[in-house]
Amino acid sequence: MDRPGISAIAHTDHPIAAPLGDDSVHALLDRALPHGDARLLDLGCGSGAWMLRAQTSRPGLRAEGVDNAPETLAAARCALTDAGCGDRSVLHAQDAAEFTSPHRYDVVLSVGATHAFGGLLPTLEAARTHLAPGGGVLLGACFWEREPGRATLDSGFAAEDFDDLATTVDRITADGWTPLHGHVSTLQEWDDYEWSWTGSLSRWALEHPEHPDSGQALKAAADHRAAWLHGYRGTLGFVTLLLHRTTRP
């Protein structure tokens, strides 16, 4: 089973692929989305959970999503169609970093997808090229809540992967962006996310013992749970920021 396949199963019960509860997602979207006719672009849309929530709350919103995982895009298409948003949604099967469009968007969203662009600032640069004048970016990214110790580094991270929160925001503002709002995921949100991730994958493996990938899935869940509980729990943070350009181009 490849990584997108594991991720699709692991997010069965937590379709927002980030440590954010439903209340936080709705609050962030309410601040970010304009009323009336508008366009949203989700770079790294996965199963379309952000698009679905955005279009449900804003009937006039047209949304486009970009992702390179066919399985999750198929799930997104079904979910958006079932919710009555199919005629206001477009999905693109390609790498988000390579996406181009004739449109400019009132909101560009990229939550938990900075790896697709090679880091924090390249993600913002990609978002900027798609942003309409006066539009906003909703960016979700990891940071270090505290200096990572040996257990965190042994769980698959490098100290230079992230900065602390203050340095992360300083880098963003120095790049020409102004934060208008931010949400730092709580430990409860992290725990809910990780228990759901590992639990959904484990449950699938136990319910499908005959599947050739069940053993791999069960091991992936166990390895992830160990890395979280013994490694990065309480050390890895996640912040979601609503950003506008400090000076318009």
Image (cartoon, grey):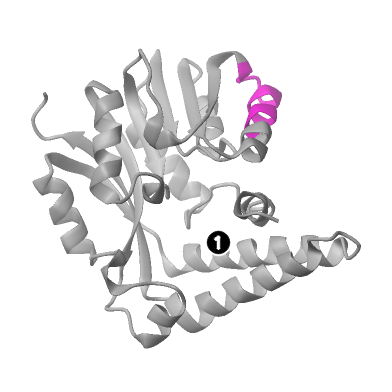
As helix, strand or loop, the secondary structure at mark 1 comes to: helix
Residue at (34%, 21%) from the top-left corner? Answer: 105
Q: Nearer the viewer, residue 48 or 59?
A: 48
Q: Is residue 235 above or below residue 14?
A: below
Report the magenta residues as a range. 76-86
Q: Position of residue 39 (x, y in %)?
A: 40, 19
To which quarter of the image does residue 2 belong?
bottom right
**Quarter that holds the C terminus:** top left
Q: Position of residue 182 (x, y in %)?
A: 28, 49
Is the magenta region chiefly helix, strand or loop?
helix
Side of 87 where 154 appears, left or right: left
Side of 193 where 185 appears, left or right: left
Crowding at label 1, few (<14), some or many (≥20) Cα neighbours within 10 Å? many
Q: Which residue is outermost to the right?
A: 210
Q: Position of residue 112 (x, y in %)?
A: 42, 50
Say whether residue 30 is visible.
no
Q: Which residue is mark 1?
A: 193
Residue at (49%, 31%) from the top-left corner? Answer: 66
Asked if residue 203 lies in the magenta stretch, the reply is no
Q: Is residue 76 above or below residue 193?
A: above
Side of 72 where 169 appears, left or right: left
Residue at (49%, 29%) from the top-left corner? Answer: 65
Q: Position of residue 91 (x, y in %)?
A: 55, 25
To which quarter of the image does residue 152 belong?
bottom left
Q: How many marks?
A: 1
Say whether residue 6 is visible.
yes
Side of 20 where 206 appears, left or right: right
Q: Nearer the viewer, residue 38 or 73?
A: 73
Q: Is residue 153 above or below residue 44?
A: below
**Quarter that holds the N terminus:** bottom right
Hey, what amino acid is under mark 1? Tyr
